[in-house]
Amino acid sequence: MGLWRGRVLDSIDNMVTVGITAAPDSIVGKFRTYVAVLTPYGIRRTRREVKHDVYVLFNPWASGLYNVPE
């Protein structure tokens, strides 16, 4: 699977809004998300919250058909 892309869309005080683009060959499914921040004390990662999971229902960038088991 290819790399997903992320970019900062906005930053106000201590709040950052990011945009995420799934890889062109990303599978359709549920993906767990979290935030990792580099601090003077090392990398800190948020806890996973189910309400922040990402669901890819359709991948318009996929170039071919998927093999679906019958």
Image (spheres, rainbow, N blue to C red):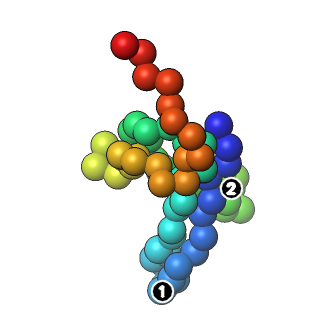
Q: Identify the mark at residue 21; answer none if there is no mark.
A: none
Quadrant of the frame with the C terminus:
top left
Q: Nearer the viewer, mark 1 or mark 2?
A: 1
Q: Do tag 1 and tag 2 residues touch (Cβ < 8 Å)?
A: no
Name the residue furthest bottom: 12
User: Residue at the spot x=47%, y=74% of the render?
Assistant: 17
User: Could you say which is closer to the camera, residue 29 or residue 60?
Assistant: 60
Q: Identify the mark at residue 41; answer none if there is no mark.
A: 2
User: Residue at the spot x=51%, y=70% of the render?
Assistant: 18
User: Residue at the spot x=67%, y=43% of the render?
Assistant: 2
Name the residue furthest left: 51
Name the residue furthest top: 70
Q: In this view, does 41 lie to the left or right of 7?
A: right
Query: Is residue 56 visible to the viewer in this orientation of the structure?
Result: yes
Query: Is residue 44 visible to the viewer in this orientation of the structure?
Result: no
Which amino acid, by three-letter code, is at mark 2?
A: Tyr
Check disc 1: other Cα within 10 Å, few if <14, some if 14-19, many if 20+: few
User: Could you say which is closer to the camera, residue 37 or residue 39?
Assistant: 37
Please identify the quarter of the rendering in which residue 38 is found. bottom right
Residue 66's place in the image compared with 40, above or below, is above
Secondary structure of the residue carrying tag 2 is loop
Q: How far apart are marks 1 and 2 (CA)?
A: 23 Å
User: Could you say which is closer to the camera, residue 63 or residue 22?
Assistant: 63
Residue 32's place in the image compared with 6, above or below, is above
Position of residue 20 measured from the top left corner of the image (x, y, whole percent): 52, 61
Check disc 2: other Cα within 10 Å, few if <14, some if 14-19, many if 20+: few
The residue that mark 1 highlights is 12
Secondary structure of the residue carrying tag 1 is strand
